[in-house]
Amino acid sequence: MKKARTSLVRTVGHVGLVVLMAIGGPATTWAADPGSPTPGESNRPWAAGVSKENQDKALELFKDGTSLLKDAFFTRAVEKYREALTSWDHPAIHFNLAKALMNLDQPVEAYNHLEAAMKFGGAPLDAEQIEQVQRYTKLLYEAELAELSVKCTEPGAKVSLNGADLFTAPGNWKGLVRAGKNTIVASAKGFQTLQEQPELPKGQVTEMDLKLTAVETETKYTRVMDAWKPWLVFGAGAAVLAAGGIFSW
């Protein structure tokens, strides 16, 4: 089992390798049990409005997911954690889900879940787990991610990013994407489809204002010859016919 796990580790992305090494290291701690109050805890705002039934369901799924995560079954662990979040939006679940996603080389989702784990200022995670969140958000942002801001004012234009719909103009979108080449498309009836593939730099913000061009402005009519030339040819032909008629007479 240990040998198989080592083989699997070698197949993940470079960021995933860094994270997995951290997960397996001696200084690593797993997320706190969502059902266990932390020492000295006076209240649990993350449990407000969540029924005992939903908490128990999420806790069971969390335990299953963590067992799978420890055995490097990352895809199955992600499924368990996502299902757990539908019952209980708990920071500890986000924390472990982010770890599984990093090992699957999904930096955007991982970053979002790390941020969600800090929704209550870090509680109920302990100091070491909070330090991990801060370290990995910085690592992901600087090594894997870019910020993109897209704007389009043409009414009715549909804007998409890498095949996924973003919004219908007029509007804008701002979020994290994987750094490197991304494809942005804007299309609207009566307009030329606009497609751009910017190279987004790591850890930086790129702003795009999409301008569509109407189809009729792209259609240009050109004359084969100057406007006076056909009339000249016509006039010359008429003169020849007239002269021929006179000579025939």
Image (cartoon, rainbow, N blue to C red):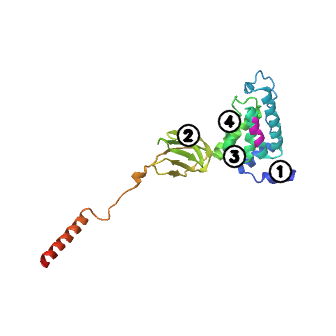
Q: How many marks?
A: 4
On the image, the x and y values in percent for residue 155 come to 47, 41
Mark 3–mark 1 Cα distance, whole angstroms, equals 20 Å
Residue 232: image quadrant is bottom left
Q: Earlier in the sequence, mark 4 or mark 1?
A: 1
Amino acid type for the residue under numbered disc 1: Arg
Q: Is residue 115 left or right of residue 40?
A: left
Which mark is in front, 2 or 1? 2
Please report the bounds of the magenta region as a residue range. Answer: 78-84
What is the residue that sits farthest to the front in this orientation?
249
Q: Main secondary structure of the magenta part?
A: helix
Amino acid type for the residue under numbered disc 4: Glu
Q: Nearer the viewer, residue 188 or 202?
A: 188
Q: Which residue position holds label 4? A: 115
Q: Earlier in the sequence, mark 4 or mark 3?
A: 3
Mark 4–mark 3 Cα distance, whole angstroms, equals 15 Å
On the image, the x and y values in percent for residue 78 come to 76, 42
Seen at 78% across and 45% down, the residue is 76
Seen at 74% across and 47% down, the residue is 103
Amino acid type for the residue under numbered disc 2: Trp
Mark 2–mark 4 Cα distance, whole angstroms, equals 19 Å
> Dot 2, crowdedness within 10 Å: few (<14), some or many (≥20)?
few
Whether residue 192 can be seen here:
yes
Q: Which residue position holds label 3? A: 106
Is residue 45 depicted above or below 227 in this figure?
A: above
Is residue 17 depicted above or below 64 in this figure?
A: below
Q: Which residue position holds label 1? A: 5
Where disc 3 sits, the SS reads loop
Q: Is residue 60 left or right of residue 174?
A: right
Circle number at residue 173: 2
